[in-house]
Image (spheres, rainbow, N blue to C red):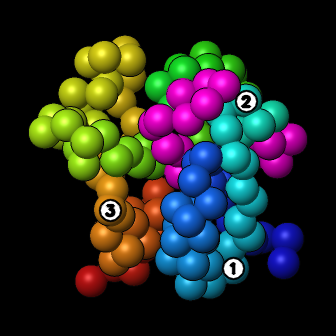
């Protein structure tokens, strides 16, 4: 399975990790790694060189914005597609797009998805970013 695509889930909530893994493990020929906070996620990303990162925004040690900025500043990881996931919209009535996050961070993530995550939309976006999307 050497041509398997690697996905890294960085989220401090185990239930969220379980959900994302359950959805994305349905994609054929992928392997999935997990990290429970931003610092651990950066370490795992450096070691595993994933093909896609699903990144929570609100986390201890390093939040998702800090991790995203660090990924984009690292020449070995700057091209890794990132799906940012957030539950902020559930707590405050503020919703963002990937473009708006890009204005804040200087570069946009490949996708910015609000929690609760839509499993169909998450899988479709992941397949697209991994180059596995089926053409119509």
Question: Disc 3 or 2, which lies upstream in sequence?
Answer: 2
Q: CA distance from mark 3 to mark 2?
A: 24 Å
Residue 49 vertical position relative to residue 69 in the rendered view, above or below: below
Image quadrant where residue 89 sits: top left
Quarter of the N terminus within the rendering: bottom right
- Residue at the farthest left position: 93
Do the residues bearing badges 1 and 2 touch, measured as CB atoms within 8 Å?
no
| Left or right, 39 with reference to 59 | right
Q: CA distance from mark 1 to mark 3?
A: 26 Å
Q: Is residue 134 above or below residue 65?
A: below
Dots 1 and 3: beta carbons under 8 Å? Answer: no
Out of 54 and 63, give the one closest to the viewer: 63
Say whether disc 1 or disc 3 marks the residue closer to the N-terminus. 1
Instruction: Identify which residue, 6 or 38, lies in the foreground.
Output: 38
Marks 1 and 2 sit apart, C-alpha to C-alpha, by: 27 Å
Which residue position holds label 2?
39
Characterize the local packing of mark 2: few (<14), some (14-19) or many (20 or more) Cα atoms within 10 angstroms: some
Based on the picture, tell me whether residue 112 belongs to the magenta stretch: no
Q: Quadrant of residue 112?
A: top left
Residue 83 visible, this orientation: yes
Tell me the magenta residue range: 44-63
Provide residue 104's location: percent of width, then percent of height.
31, 16
Give the residue at mark 3.
116
> Which residue occupies 31% across, 25% down?
102
Residue 59, x across and y down, in percent: 55, 35
Helix, strand or loop at label 1? It is loop
Circle 1 residue = 29
Q: Nearer the viewer, residue 86 or 93?
A: 93
């Amino acid at each position: 399975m050497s041509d398997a695509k690697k996905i890294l889930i960085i989220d401090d909530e185990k239930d969220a990790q379980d959900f994302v893994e359950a959805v994305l493990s349905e994609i054929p020929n992928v392997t999935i790694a997990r990290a429970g906070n931003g610092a651990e996620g950066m370490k795992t990303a450096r070691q595993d060189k994933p093909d896609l990162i699903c990144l929570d925004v609100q986390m201890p040690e390093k939040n998702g914005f800090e991790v995203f900025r660090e990924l984009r500043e690292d020449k070995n990881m700057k091209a890794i597609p990132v799906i940012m996931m957030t539950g902020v919209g559930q707590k405050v009535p503020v919703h963002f797009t990937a473009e708006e996050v890009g204005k804040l961070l200087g570069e946009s993530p490949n996708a910015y998805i609000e929690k609760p995550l839509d499993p169909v939309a998450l899988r479709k976006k992941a397949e697209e970013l991994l180059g596995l999307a089926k053409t119509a």
